[in-house]
Image: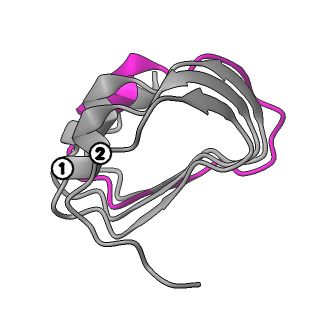
Amino acid sequence: ELGYLRTLKSMSLYGNKLSGEIPKSLSQLNNLIEMDLSQNELHGSIPEGIGDLPKLEALHLFGNNLSGSVPRKLGTNGKLQFLDLSGNNLTGTCHSHWEAASP
């Protein structure tokens, strides 16, 4: 039902012990600027449509049990400035138009 919140700009559900997969309906939140689903018990893959969110600047998905490959569209989303996928079981190669930032 979160997909119906079309005017939502920021969503933080950090550390709520949420389980299951990331709902594909979150790809409909076209006004979302920041999404934080970190430190939950989410599994499955990252929905491809998350990379299509036109205003998304920050995506925090660290500390879950996500698997599969990182959606290519995340690397080509020109608005995305912060992406943290650490602490998951993701595979494959990250494709990006960004240059790696120095820590």
Which residue is label 1 attached to?
A: 76
- Could you tell me if residue 29 is visible in this image? no
The residue most toward the front is: 93
Q: Position of residue 83 (x, y in %)?
A: 47, 59
Display colour scheme: one colour
Question: Could you tell me which secondary element the residue under label 1 belongs to?
Answer: helix
In the rendered view, does 37 fall on the left or right side of 102? right
Foreground tag (2 vs 1) = 2
Q: Which residue is mark 2?
A: 95
Q: Give residue 9's position: percent from left, percent from top.
A: 35, 58
The residue depicted at 27 percent of the width and 35 percent of the height is 72
Image height of 45 relative to 39, above or below: above
Q: Real-space Cα distance between discs 2 and 1?
A: 8 Å
Q: What range is drawn magenta here?
A: 11-34
What amino acid type should be assigned to the residue bearing mark 1?
Thr
Q: Residue at x 62, y 44 (%)?
A: 37
